[in-house]
Image (spheres, rainbow, N blue to C red):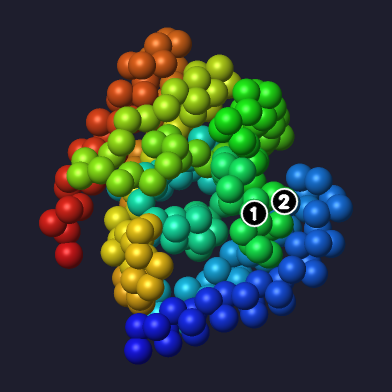
Amino acid sequence: MRYLYVIYALVLFVALFLVVLPFVLLFSLFGNRGRRASWVVVRIWAYIWFNLVGIFNKNIYEARPVKGRNYIVVANHISYLDTPVIFRAIPFFVRPLATYEYSKIPLFGYLYKHLAVIIDRANLQSKSDGVKVLRHTLDEGSSILIFPEGRFNKSDKLLNDFYDGAFKIALQTDTPILPLLFLDTNKLWHYNRFWSFRPGRNRVVFLPEINPAEHKGNVKEFKDKVFREMEFYLKKYQNFR
């Protein structure tokens, strides 16, 4: 039954994506406004797909984001399901930072190239260009999303060490960090077991925003503050049912 469920979920994923693809292709002609329109369409797709495969999302707010404020959203990274959850759980437009590998995914890769900022970590020029696009996105009044651990957390720790990038940009642009916690995506689809995908509850915790102005240009201090906050709440919710 598990194999049948995974096949059903993937077929449904592709079928629904083919429905929204013409809209994404059309909106891709209109720059940032087109990306925002595509975001709305993809959120509708995510709502339908999550419900039809039996994954029920619940947002938990330790603090609610301020409506209309742009953020640098950071989240822990533990599953391939983290990417679709971005569109299902976050109620405002964000432009994710993604590695080049995501752009190679059939069909979904095109969507990600349109909505996300794609970088090749092995290419210094690509990384530099990506940072410029992220800063330009913030200047346009949009939010961005970065997984500060870089790749999946495959360790026994609650979080891997964070890279500096998100926190440097936050300090340079005076943009608050909004931490999110994905609590259940690894249980629903383990990064190392393709056929482990299953239905269930998916919780996303929104933490209080953290203001860069309090840290006066100290990247390490700022990064450590966000790390400690996320680690604290991950411990809190470890035993939460």
Give the quadrant of the N terminus: bottom left
Residue drawn at 55 percent across, 69 percent down:
46
Q: Secondary structure at mark 1?
A: helix
Q: How many marks?
A: 2
Along the line of sight, which residue is nearer the eye, 232 or 187?
187
Residue drawn at 34 percent across, 71 percent down:
196
Q: Which residue is mark 1?
A: 104
Residue drawn at 51 percent across, 35 percent down:
72
The answer to whether any part of residue 68 appears in the image is no
Query: Can you give x and y, in whole percent of width and height, for residue 104 in the image?
Result: 64, 54
Query: Can you give x and y, in whole percent of width and height, for residue 189 in the image?
Result: 37, 65
Identify the image quadrant of residue 133: top right
Q: Earlier in the sequence, mark 2 or mark 1?
A: 1
Mark nearer the viewer, 2 or 1: 1
Residue 138 vertical placement versus 6 (above, below): above
Q: Amino acid at mark 2?
A: His
Residue drawn at 36 percent across, 77 percent down:
199
Q: Are marks 2 and 1 in contact (CB under 8 Å)?
A: no
Q: Which mark is residue 114?
A: 2
The answer to whether any part of residue 185 appears in the image is yes
Q: Residues within 10 Å of mark 1 (few under 14, many from 20)?
A: few
